[in-house]
Image (cartoon, rainbow, N blue to C red):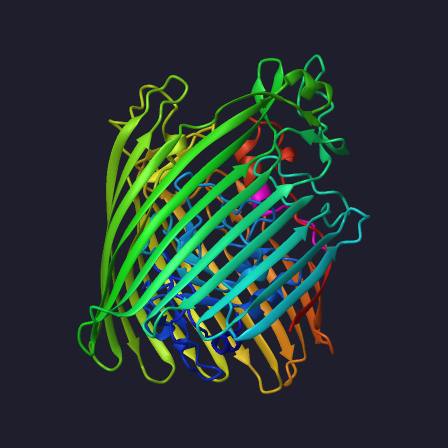
Amino acid sequence: MNPRHLAASVAALTGALAGPTFAQAAAQATNETDIQDTMVVVGSRTPTEISRIPGAVWVVDQQQLQTQLRTGADLKTALGKLVPGLDLAPQGRTNYGQNMRGRSVQVLIDGVSLNSSRGLSRQFDAIDPFNIERVEVLSGASSLYGGGATGGLINIITKKGDREGIHLATEAGMTSGFNGADDLDYRLAQSMSGGNETVRGRLAVAYQDNGRHFDAGGDEIFPDIAQTDLQDNRSIDVMGSLDVQLTEQQSLQFGAQLYRSGYEGDRGVYFPNLDAASPDLNDAEIRDGYASDRDPATDRKMVNLQYHHADLLGQNFYLQAFHREEEASFQAFPYPVAGGSEFRASRQNTDLSGLKALFDADLTDTLSLTYGLDLDRESFDATQMTFDKAVSDASGGLVQEEAGVTPRYPSYRVDGISAFAQGEWQATEGLQLSAGVRRQHMDVEVEDFQGIPGGENDYDATLINAGVLYDYGNGHQNWLQFSQGFELPDPAKYYGKSAEVSVDQNPLSAIKTDQVELGWRYNSGAWMTQAALYYAWSDKAVENAEDLSVSVVEEKKRDYGFEGAVTRYFDSGLEAGATLHLVRSEQENADGEWEKRDARYASLSSATAFLGWQDLQGERSARLQANHAFDLEDDNDREIDGFTTLDLNLRQALPVGEVSLGVANLLDKEYSTVWGQRAAMFYSPYYGPEYLYDYQGRGRTYTLTWSMDY
């Protein structure tokens, strides 16, 4: 993290987590090193200085993010290296298992949640980083937001028109490991923004085209056939915003996005034994000639309307209305059947609409209250395309022709209504007390599925939080906080398994996570530090069966650990820093003893360290960074091997724009990704041999980027 750049980039807020967002909040004037006065919304759903939040808050500004991206990293990889409590990322399309503090994380764009009750792990296959202004992160369970925030919150704030006149920005880049003509990724992005004091807008288009990827041994990386990857993937992100100052007290902001990310290549997995007398999935290889009637893709449409009134009934009032449509398609996957394997591919559709209202009132000079109401509706349906077995077998799985389409999971609708209130009392000059409650009611309606009756039920969740923050007045702060979050078992996998699981008589139950956190931060001209000890626990858990269906079991789980970051600044322009996350995940066994959690779900501890330099004019910079994932072994002897990689980034200003050179995996380390090792545990041997799922890490790559603002 680079808090100097972070503080310097403080601007009008453009998003609020799971609640109203706004564009016209006044920027907080700070000096270059005073990060604690940076305004964020992650801690309280209203614009709040970091120094008033009793919790670990991390803000990744645009320059920090670009430094990581220009080594060839994608968004989830960049955040995994910058946010201490967030796991290092997988390198495919999925972010499954990229937890925060060992638990699930809720991801939002300008306050619109990208999570769903279905639990698809594609929240970061959602936006091109060219359109990101900054990212706000709150570590730990949160009671102020909906389901999924048991480990933390990530709010992606998008760029807006922020100046009068016309402003253009252009970016072009390419990445390669020089392993052949197919080993080339390139990207192009262009934006235009501008306006006047009353109306300002921005329109941007970003395009990314990926080639094939190779490991450190120079071998083509085997595709992730389970969750799909980003090889031969094309993405385009079209995003626009319009800000209107209606009156001195009122503002309106409209945002819209069209996003598509999908496979468009002709390379696929060839299985030589599909038409053998004893068919199996051994000895597969990558070949040309792939063609399928359903390819991996993520398609999203989103609109977001935000209204702010600075003096409605003597209070600040925020209103947000939004709608998101998302279609997630998967690739042909081999399912065991009599006589070999049958290939199928699912497509899963989620629609989410919501309305959120919030009042922020100063009751006295020392007492404030934030309260509001959230309404949302989520609809889900999914189909599964079955491919012609004779064609699949004859082509070794390269050609997949549609044989039929059937429902994949039960369709359902979830209607939610939630009320919340959060109070804050400045008891003394240094002591601040806060507390809040959220009451959430959800109605679930499930349709009939393959002869299994559907039905309706509902459930409730009450979540509380309380915190104490003490500011010593010399840059040091301490806090103690208790907070709750919850997650919901996946309705699509929970129901529809058996007629014995009646929807009416088996309502879903919120799986609560309780957390206690003790934290400290310190800010001075030469040092920037933040650290927290945490302990989180829950009494229930979601358990995956061999057929990948889920059930809720009475099983106690706990996660505890330490997360922290430190940066030291030197007068010469040098800076050095490190992040550290030590996490221990455990579950209680039948004998009442605590044992290590299953390696398929437990988070790995991780650490980063960097040495950077920037000249006084800001025209050139360099950064060398090490990233380390620790080994993990559970009590059933399942193991995940950790790894260490180095990244280098060099930047130079030019007479026209600037250019950067990034080298990822500088030492060309050969390793299996964490997701690859987990996937092998999930899918093998039931769905085939282990090598099919052991997704490898990419070898050394070089990224050249040119950009210009004008």
Q: Which residue appears at 25% of the width and 50% of the height?
A: 418
Magenta range: 667-676
Residue most extreme to the bottom:
571
Q: Is residue 669 magenta?
A: yes
Q: Residue furthest right?
A: 180
Q: Quadrant of residue 231?
A: top right
In the image, residue 56 sits, relative to residue 429, either above or below, namely: above
Which residue is at a point 36% across and 38% down the rendered structure image?
A: 489
569 in magenta? no
Q: Is residue 629 visible?
A: no
Q: Predominant secondary structure in magenta?
A: loop
Which quarter shows the C terminus?
bottom right
Instruction: Judge from the rendering whether residue 616 lies leftward or rightward of residue 466; answer left or right.
Output: right
Q: Could you say where residue 293 lies in the image, as x and y percent from the top left?
A: 63, 28
* x and y, in percent, of residue 454 in the image: 32, 24
Q: Foreground: 487 or 66?
A: 66
415 on left or right of 344: left
Quarter holding residue 319: bottom left
* Residue 279 image offset from top left, x and y in percent: 67, 17
Establish if 69 lies above or below 478. Answer: above
The location of residue 216, given as percent across then percent down, is 73, 50
